[in-house]
Image: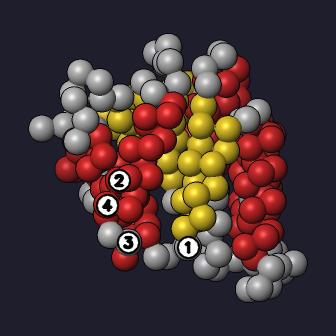
Amino acid sequence: MEKERHVLVIFPHPDDEAFSVSGTIAKYIHDGTPVTYACLTLGQMGRNLGSPPFATRETLPDVRREELMEAARVLGLEDLRMLGYRDKTIEFLDESVLVNEFTGLIEELNPSLIISFYPGYSVHPDHDATAEAVVRTLEKMDPVQRPKLLCLAFSRNCIEDLGEPDVHNDVQNFAEKKIATIAAHRSQTQLYALSLQEGLKNQDQAILERLYTERLWTYKFK
């Protein structure tokens, strides 16, 4: 992992960061790099309410807000921005709304690296809409001043279309913190976090591969 001036992580939902790049975030923080996480929504429409259920449709936004704050605490992340958009509506926003939001963040923070989803290869409409707005924002910038953009992709055709990931971050030393970050999003991840803990304990190779390496693609601007 290269030394960065400031890392800005942009995702639409609580727990997007946990599954995908919590090890990378933890490593940057450990190395003294400032990290900001801008989370667009509270995941109000998440399908899970706990296992067994402990949230309701009415309480889920508050539950997920607290879970996101706990995940940030676990990571040591001091700059969490909850942007206040509504879950499952990001694709319907005028793109200029998010471009203006992201432009403001970039002007304030001056990041050298942004991490988000790869547009068209991240399955969920909110994921793709967020990613597309990130790309549009950066395309408007002077290429000399533009931060790097690393993207997550996990659609079935991502390897076929994009090739192998450009970045393989070794986060083995942060595996337990990654599990704890996932577990913090308890309403959505309770059983999965337990399976990861069991896999780490038993040295399950498939689980270790998932925990120890985080893969990203470099977005190549035209």
Q: Residue furthest bottom?
A: 57
Q: Disc 4 vs disc 1: Cβ atoms closer than 8 Å?
A: no
Q: Position of residue 199 (x, y in %)?
A: 73, 46
Who's the residue at 42% across and 24% down the image? 112
Apparent side of residue 179 relative to residue 93 in the rendered image (left or right): right
Q: Is residue 210 above or below residue 61?
A: above
Q: Position of residue 17 (x, y in %)?
A: 59, 48
Of the numbered discs 2 and 3, the one sitting upstream in the chain is 3
- As measured in the structure, the alpha-carbon distance from the residue carrying label 3 to the one carrying label 1 is 10 Å
The residue type indicated by label 1 comes to Arg
Q: Disc 2 vs disc 1: Cβ atoms closer than 8 Å?
A: no
Residue named by callout 4: 96
Residue named by callout 2: 99
Q: Is residue 14 visible?
A: yes
- As measured in the structure, the alpha-carbon distance from the residue carrying label 2 to the one carrying label 3 is 11 Å
The residue type indicated by label 4 comes to Ser
- As measured in the structure, the alpha-carbon distance from the residue carrying label 4 to the one carrying label 3 is 8 Å
Rendered image: mark on residue 93? 3
